[in-house]
Every structure is written in structure tokens, then in C-alpha cells.
């Protein structure tokens, strides 16, 4: 009999076209999925930028009229999904182009899911068997086009949406929310500001780091995560310092989608805390992950020593083991001008007891390498507020 520890259920991603200039292939991908009138969903900031206009023009020139829905903010709420779904129905749109960073991609995937279901979005929250409520033949096809290198939502089967009444982040899930086609063109990230490059790059690091440390047997995820962290170690600072460095931008875009592929193994307290802060404080997700990262690493130390030793060797760090990786993370954060404590995100001591139960209930909490409790989660929030790494 095979030991239970050596068993797992593995799902890996979709068709990906990767490389500079490949946005020109957008009409081909739309047609592969049977789209004639796609709806491009993006965020308010991207709606009027040249890269968005170019994507629409490429489709229009190929005979694919493409409408835009751009009522998407950072940490988007359910109302954005409802509005997008209404527009998809009213315009008889037969597919969705998810264009932008994580917020736009998440809204787009949720719109494609819910537009023709005849049920409210929250009926599909990732609780129990809710995903079985989905009428799969009613899903709209999705082409995902990321314009940042952080969330990896282009290869994800879920969307993170804020439940506006409870101010919590909910995960909407169905296996077929995974976009059927992904177009990764690093040229779309060349104009990304340095501070956003830093935040989303640290988000990619958090995905890969937590995936590597999550419990369970998943050698494919471990291998992908380690290689992605190596790419990040080579490219993130370079992209931060010179946004026109297309090689660094390409490596970061690859590392981003690798992280979202690897974290099918699991995430952990970095994301539990970040989701809680994002819902309550509207803090940027990638930045939140970056700030809490070392505090969660220290908390998990006993369970992740072996993984960190392996990672340190891969990164070629002078100082080995957990301490070497921790110092690398701290130095990287400092170089990227990431705040050291959650006070910069609006957290106070009072938030520790308020946010701990929200974080503990988050779907990422059960795969933290060290089991979490109300008291340990509160202490994590206090440590991240006070800068305590001992």
C-alpha cells in the first residue's frame, strides 16, 4: 500500500502563450474560444491607457468588436461583479477578456462565472460543495491577459472578492474558472510604476514561498515554487530599478504565473492576514503580504527549516538555512522600500483581536505549516505591528 503521505490530487494550468509582443495574437485566442463579441474587463486605472486601447484596436481591426467594463477598484467588491455581469448580458457578449492586474482578472473571472447562472455571486463562495451549484454550460469563456507580475490570477481557478456588507474577502471558486487561454506579454508591464512593481513582485514571492512551505506531498509544486523564487531573486530588483528591462519583466511575469500554479498545494498565514487586512483596511494585497512575510516565516520556522535550507542552496546564499533566507527577504524588502510594520497599512493594536478571527476563518489558514489558533494569530498581528522578529 502507498503511504498516505505520498498521495495527492494535482491540477495544473492551461494553454499559455508567453513572450514580448504576443498581444497581437489576442484575436486568434478569442476566436479559438468562439468569441464574436468579447467584453474586456479591466480596472479604472488601465481603462484609458495606451496598452488597453491597443488591445481593443487589435481586436477591432480583426473584426471582433470589443466593449470595455472598467468599474474595478483595488480590493473589488461584489457590486463590481454584479455590474459587469449585467453588462455582459445586456451586450450579448459571448466571452470575456480579463485584462489587468489581480483585481481586474478576479472580477472578470467572476463575471464569466455568474453572468448566466441566475443566482447571486455569494452562492458560489468556496465553502463546502457550493461549486457544484454552477451550471457549467452557462460559463462564458475567458482569455486572461495579465498586465502586472504578481497575483498569477491568470492561471487561477478562483476569484477573491470583498463581501461589502461584512467587509471580508471571500473566495469564489469553480474548477472551470481557470481561463481557457492565457496571453502573457511582458511588454504590457513596462510602464508599471516602481512601487507597484515592488508590491506585486513580493506578492509573487509570497505565493511561491507559502506554496513551498505548505504541508503535503506535491513535488511538482515544490519544484515550480523553488525555480520561481530563483527567478524573482534575479529579476525583481532589476525590474524595480529599471522598468524598461524586458528580460527582468519577462522573468517576473513567468514567476508570477508559476506562483499561482504552485499554490494549488496551499498558502498560509501571510495570505490569511493579508486578506483580513484588505477586507477591513483596504490595504493593497501584495504590499500586505510583503509586510507580514518575515513575521510569518519566524512563526513557522520549526516546520520549514528543511525547505529553507533547500531554498538557500538554490539561491546561492552565503549564509545557509532559515536565517540566510530570512535575511535575504529582509534585505530585499528594504531595497524595495517595503514598510517594516503593518502600522504603515493602518493597523493598530486593537486590530489584532478584531482581525485574528477573520484571518483564522480564511481558506488559506488551514495549510499554514504550523497550526494557527486565535491566540497565535493575534500574536502574529501584534508582532507585525511592533516589528518583533524574535
Image (cartoon, rainbow, N blue to C red):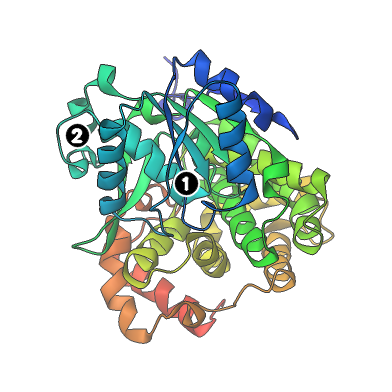
Image quadrant in which you'd find residue 82:
top left
Q: Residue at x 48, y 26 (%)?
A: 6
The reply to whether residue 115 is visible in this rendering is: yes
Residue that carries the numbered disc 1 in the rendered image: 42
Q: Residue at x 68, y 49 (%)?
A: 189
Q: Residues within 10 Å of mark 2 (few under 14, many from 20)?
A: some
Residue that carries the numbered disc 2 in the rendered image: 130
The reply to whether residue 310 is visible in this rendering is: no
Q: Image height check: is 12 above or below 169?
A: above
User: Residue 267: horizontal and vertical position, in percent?
Assistant: 46, 48
User: Residue 135: horizontal and vertical position, in percent?
Assistant: 21, 22
Image quadrant in which you'd find residue 357:
bottom left
Q: Residues within 10 Å of mark 1 (few under 14, many from 20)?
A: many
The N terminus appears in which quarter of the rendering? top left
Per the model, the C-alpha gap separating discs 2 and 1 is 27 Å
Instruction: Work out whether residue 136 or residue 53 is closer to the camera in this orientation and state it.
Output: 53
Instruction: Work out whether residue 3 or residue 172 is closer to the camera in this orientation and state it.
Output: 172
Side of 318 relative to 118 (left or right): right
Instruction: Work out whether residue 369 or residue 131 is closer to the camera in this orientation and state it.
Output: 131
User: Residue 204: horizontal and vertical position, in percent?
Assistant: 60, 50
Amino acid at each position: 500500500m502507498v503511504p498516505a503521505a505520498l498521495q495527492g490530487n494535482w491540477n495544473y494550468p492551461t494553454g499559455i502563450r508567453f513572450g514580448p509582443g504576443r498581444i497581437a495574437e489576442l484575436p486568434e485566442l478569442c476566436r479559438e474560444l468562439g468569441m464574436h463579441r468579447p467584453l474586456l474587463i479591466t480596472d479604472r486605472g488601465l481603462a484609458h491607457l495606451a496598452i488597453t486601447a491597443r488591445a481593443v484596436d487589435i481586436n477591432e481591426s480583426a473584426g471582433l468588436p470589443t466593449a470595455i467594463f472598467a468599474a474595478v477598484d483595488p480590493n473589488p467588491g461584489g457590486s463590481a461583479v454584479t455590474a459587469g455581469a449585467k453588462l455582459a448580458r445586456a451586450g450579448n457578449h459571448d466571452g470575456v477578456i480579463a485584462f489587468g492586474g489581480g483585481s481586474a482578472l478576479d472580477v472578470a473571472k467572476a463575471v464569466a462565472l455568474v453572468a448566466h447562472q441566475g443566482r447571486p455571486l455569494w452562492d458560489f463562495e468556496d465553502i463546502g460543495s457550493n461549486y457544484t451549484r454552477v451550471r457549467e454550460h452557462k460559463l462564458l469563456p475567458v482569455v486572461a491577459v495579465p498586465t502586472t507580475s504578481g497575483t498569477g490570477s491568470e492561471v487561477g481557478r478562483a476569484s477573491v472578492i470583498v463581501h461589502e456588507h461584512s467587509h471580508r474577502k471571500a473566495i469564489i471558486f469553480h474548477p472551470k474558472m481557470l481561463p481557457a487561454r492565457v496571453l502573457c506579454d511582458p511588454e504590457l508591464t513596462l510602464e508599471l510604476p516602481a512601487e507597484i512593481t515592488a508590491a506585486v513582485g513580493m506578492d509573487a514571492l509570497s505565493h511561491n514561498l507559502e506554496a513551498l512551505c505548505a504541508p503535503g506531498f506535491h513535488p511538482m509544486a515544490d519544484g515550480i515554487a523553488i525555480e520561481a523564487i530563483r527567478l524573482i531573486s534575479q529579476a525583481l530588483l532589476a525590474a524595480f530599478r529599471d522598468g524598461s528591462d524586458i528580460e527582468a519583466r519577462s522573468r517576473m511575469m513567468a514567476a508570477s504565473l508559476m506562483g499561482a500554479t504552485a499554490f494549488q498545494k496551499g498558502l498560509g498565514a501571510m495570505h490569511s492576514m493579508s486578506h483580513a487586512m484588505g477586507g477591513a483596511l483596504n490595504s493593497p494585497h501584495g504590499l500586505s503580504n510583503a509586510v507580514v512575510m518575515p513575521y510569518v516565516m519566524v512563526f513557522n520556522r520549526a516546520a520549514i527549516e528543511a525547505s529553507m535550507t533547500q531554498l538557500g542552496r538554490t539561491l546561492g546564499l552565503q549564509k545557509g538555512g532559515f536565517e540566510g533566507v530570512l535575511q535575504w527577504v529582509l534585505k530585499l524588502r528594504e531595497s524595495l522600500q517595503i514598510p517594516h510594520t503593518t502600522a504603515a497599512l493602518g493597523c493598530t493594536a486593537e486590530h489584532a483581536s478584531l482581525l485574528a478571527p477573520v484571518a483564522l476563518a480564511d481558506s488559506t489558514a488551514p495549510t499554514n505549516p504550523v497550526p494557527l489558533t486565535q491566540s497565535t494569530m493575534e500574536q502574529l498581528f501584534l508582532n507585525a505591528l511592533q516589528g518583533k522578529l524574535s
